[in-house]
Amino acid sequence: MSCLSEEYKFIIDAVKSAITNTPIDKNYENVNYRKVCSIALSHCISSLLSRALKLSSISVDEDILKKISASDKIMLMSSLARKNARENITKIFKENDVDFVLLKGANLQNLYPEKYWRYSCDIDVLVKEKDYEKSYKIFKNAGYDFDSRNDKHYVFTKKPYICVEIHKKLCSENNFFENVWQNTIEKDGSLVLKKEFELAYLVYHIAENFSKNAGIGIHSVTDIYLYIKNYKNEIDEKVLYDYLEKNGILKFYQSLKTLGEIWFENKESSEFYDRLTDFIISGNRNGNASNAASIRMNNNKPLFFEKILFMFSKIFLPYKDLKKIYPALEKVPFLLPVFWLIRIAGIVFRREHRSFQRANDIFKNTNKKSIENTKEIFKELDLYNKKIITVRKKHYENAQKEKP
């Protein structure tokens, strides 16, 4: 990884240090720790960085340490709150005779030396379709606040840290994952997914996010690496590869697996994996606006024209999308042009507006080179122009705020 910046090399070694409980074994003399701190915060891995700094006895400025420490404490408190919530959810479902499976972050946290080091913003739980409406009533009666629903799940919250997504299915438009209950086994009194099926679903979910946002977090690569390392004796590789091939994500999985070995086992890198590393770290845990724009732009047309068209599509949202931002629009749909003007005013005159920041990022950082680089990465991962990833179109179109 010789072509990467010192900060990128350091952040990878810091994650490796934390998950292996060993000091950083390289001498870094020209690292900008403010940049390192910024990367850690944007990827929600401040707890891993904090542990690595302590293990390696690395001295950084006090204000940087305060930022890292504050983030670490918030992650710990929110993780403890979610732990209590998961125990409460388990108790509630068992008392009401509802079969359920905990998904994603709830299970991935077990792979890390300290569970709270793996950031998770919500609790995902799967129930059978016959128990879906029943689950809604159970959570309402248990004191959770109903937030929203879509074609795939209900969302409940409990301030300040708890967000629960109750799923009736894993994916909106992928028939492969419909046989989820046939791929569960009982372990310690609870249902869990079989390892090949769970790993295939995790990779699919990461690929879906990668295709939507043109980026994933450092934690996604770390998750896959730790999952393989911890469960390699329980995974039937032939079955796993069959699942991945059926979903069109075998090459993507193999690339993530190789990248994890490069990061954490000193496997020799290549020009492509250096570019992929740079691509991932330069975004945040959800990619970034300029990379996402790059994959949707055509290098054969004038770039400024492409940027204008892209921004036009993001500003002048269709009615179904704009009413999610401005609920009042649903009562007065004929005022759609007025709400477009309100949105434009917010973007132009509020510099803190997310859309302003994204627009600024796109116009500053999107160029012909970045567009070509993004598309080359997608092609190498066998994701370019593939229809296996639906970008959750139906999922978002069907989002509703009303009670069922």
Image (tube, rainbow, N blue to C red):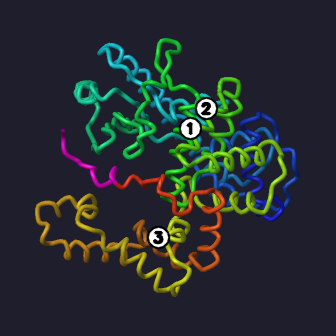
Amino acid type, label 2: Val
Amino acid type, label 1: Tyr
Image disc number at residue 9: none
Q: Which quadrant is the C terminus positioned in?
A: top left
Q: Position of residue 48 (x, y in %)?
A: 67, 42
Image disc number at residue 357: 3
Q: Residue at x 42, y 31 (%)?
A: 179
Question: Would you say 348 lies left or right of 342 here?
Answer: right
Q: Examine the structure image and report whether residue 348 is included in the region drawn in magenta.
A: no
Q: Position of residue 243 (x, y in %)?
A: 56, 38
- Dot 3 or dot 2: first in sequence order is 2
Question: Would you say 349 lies left or right of 208 here?
Answer: left
Question: Above or below — where is 152 with respect to 33?
Answer: above
- The image quarter containing residue 231 is top right
Marks 1 & 2, CB-CB < 8 Å contact:
yes
Q: Position of residue 399 (x, y in %)?
A: 28, 50
Q: Nearer the viewer, residue 224 or 15?
A: 224
Magenta highlight range: 394-404
Residue beneath label 1, please? Answer: 243
Q: Nearer the viewer, residue 113 or 391?
A: 391
Marks 3 & 1, CB-CB < 8 Å contact:
no
